[in-house]
Image (spheres, rainbow, N blue to C red):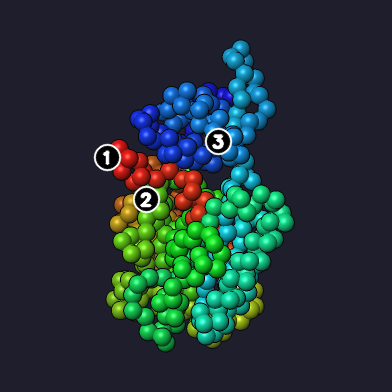
Amino acid sequence: MNETRPIRAKSGTNHEGTSAHNRRVMIDALRMNGALSRADLARATKLTKQTVSNIIDELEQDGLVSSQDVVRKGRGQPSTPYGLVPEGAFAIGLQIDRHTTRALAVDLMGNILTRAEANLPPDGPSSGVKVILDLVGTVRRDLAKRASQSERRLVGLGAAMPGPFGVEASADDPWMMAAWQTFPLLEMLAAGTGLEVGLQNDAAACATAERMVGAAHGLDHAVCLYLGYGIGAGLILGGELYSGANGNAGEIGMALLSPGGRSAPLEHRASLASLYQHLAIDPADPKLYSIIADLAASGDARVSSWIEEAAMDLRWSVHLIETIFDPQTVILCCGAPEALARRLVAAMEPLLPSLSSRPDRAIPRFQLGMTDPWAVALGAAAEPISRAFDPRFSAILKSAG
């Protein structure tokens, strides 16, 4: 192995009672960098070589890492790199949106193994529950056919849906899923699947996906501006996803701030829902994605006028995000077609001056991330993987205390 290779890794600790944290640090380092030798891992994580060797042996016995071909370089001793085993763990992700639900299964590396989607009935959870559980069951059975040990290595189910959570919502507010907001979703999913279940909003799920396999991979400070039916921001701060006191951190779409002095919430003016209204398109149309893609690619005048207005508000949003959070980058991720997203990003340039306007930048202030309707479900699936294997510094601080 090249001993001068730059390696990104969080620090472990050699104090007693912290082995679980060190296991997570080791897995995280292998996910970020790919295969590493024990010496690489010890140097990057600041753990002793003996501690690294003990943990690697444990992870290998647990089927989470495996040794690769010995590397011989120069006159030094040969080294053995270790990499994560994709089949070491699996998770299922579920997206619940206003008209559609999507489910998929991933392995430890975030590779999508199987996926399925279904239309949700208009009466909400009263009949939608069965559709969702059937969909999860379909994905789970297909995963078992593809990976014989999937049930034993299934770490959980992640769910994502639009927020905010725990606030009063009017039943006729198109931006709020009022019936689902008051429904005991976590309890329903746990009882129906027998799995540990986590819930996050769709913006946080997109940030989780970008952190695992997208533009935020390897970054400690990034904000994902999610453009969906509504608008939200997924916050990656200090290497961890920040959700706030009630799971509503980053609900920027509800902000009333605007350079034009308008009082309507941001998502009423610049979300995909506002585009659907502008085009008089039914958001429940199963061909919605292709319709928008065709209109955006053809230079439709109505789409162009919406982009011009939305870009002004989103440009201001990026300025606020940079000023408040000082991220390494802001990433636009959305369920919109790439043709629309790229036109929107181009229209937002030049960005407004902010604290992020630094001459020494190595990463763009603003960049395009995932433009995939499956990104939210992918992030939902990444959440159980993260919960099971990513370092949690809040936990290590509690152990030290």
Q: Is residue 354 visible?
A: no
The amino acid on which the numbered mark 2 sits, given as a three-letter code, is Leu
Q: Nearer the viewer, residue 27 or 373?
A: 27
Residue that badge 2 annotates:
237
Tell me the residue at 38%/41% (across/down). Answer: 360
Considering only vertical position in the picture, is 197 above or below 260? Answer: above
Considering only vertical position in the picture, is 306 above or below 40? Answer: below
Tell me the residue at 46%/71% (across/down). Answer: 185
Q: Is residue 198 visible?
A: yes
Q: Earlier in the sequence, mark 1 or mark 2?
A: 2
Residue that badge 1 annotates:
401
- Element type at mark 3: helix
- Element type at mark 1: loop
Q: Earlier in the sequence, mark 1 or mark 3?
A: 3
- Element type at mark 2: strand
Farthest left residue in view? 401
Image coords of residue 319 (percent x, y):
35, 60
Q: CA distance from mark 3 to mark 2?
A: 28 Å
The amino acid on which the numbered mark 1 sits, given as a three-letter code, is Gly
How dense is the environment of label 3, judged by Cα within 10 Å: few (below 14), some, or many (20 and up)?
Answer: some
Q: Quadrant of the N terminus?
A: top right
Which image quadrant for residue 180?
Answer: bottom left
Considering only vertical position in the picture, is 156 above or below 51? Answer: below
Q: Nearer the viewer, residue 290 or 187?
A: 187
Residue that badge 3 annotates:
59
Number of the front mark, 3 or 2: 3
Q: CA distance from mark 1 to mark 2?
A: 23 Å
Tell me the residue at 55%/68% (across/down). Answer: 192
Q: Earlier in the sequence, mark 3 or mark 2?
A: 3
The amino acid on which the numbered mark 3 sits, given as a three-letter code, is Leu
